[in-house]
Amino acid sequence: FLSELTRLFDKSRLSGSVVLTIKR
């Protein structure tokens, strides 16, 4: 469960980073 949560968080963070890059 913890690993799944960590993976989800990492994916979300990566998505946020991509969004920021696109916005910029």
Image: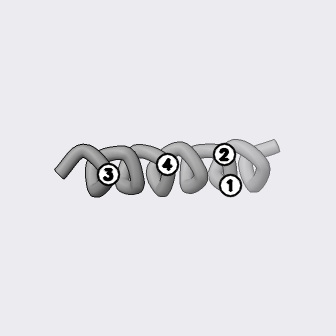
What SS does tag 1 mark? helix
Q: How is the image coloured?
A: one colour
**Residue 24 position in % (x across, y down):** 82, 43
Q: Which residue is mark 1?
A: 18
> Which residue lies at the image location 63% right of the left edge and 51% below the top edge?
19
Q: Which residue is mark 3?
A: 3
Of the two numbered discs 2 and 4 in the rendering, the one whose residue sits closer to the viewer: 4
Q: Name the amino acid, label 4.
A: Asp
Count numbered badges in the picture. 4
> Which residue lies at the image location 69% right of the left edge and 43% below the top edge?
20
Labels 1 and 2 touching (C-beta < 8 A): yes
Of the two numbered discs 2 and 3 in the rendering, the one whose residue sits closer to the viewer: 3
User: How far apart, in angstroms, are the residues tagged by discs 1 and 4?
Assistant: 12 Å
* Crowd tier of the residue under label 4, counting other residues whose Cα lies within 10 Å: few below 14, some 14–19, many 20 or above: few
Left or right of 16? Residue 3 is left
Q: Name the amino acid, label 3.
A: Ser
Q: Which residue is mark 2?
A: 17
* Crowd tier of the residue under label 1, counting other residues whose Cα lies within 10 Å: few below 14, some 14–19, many 20 or above: few
Q: Which residue is mark 4?
A: 10
What SS does tag 2 mark? helix
What SS does tag 3 mark? helix
> Which residue lies at the image location 73% right of the left edge and 47% below the top edge?
23
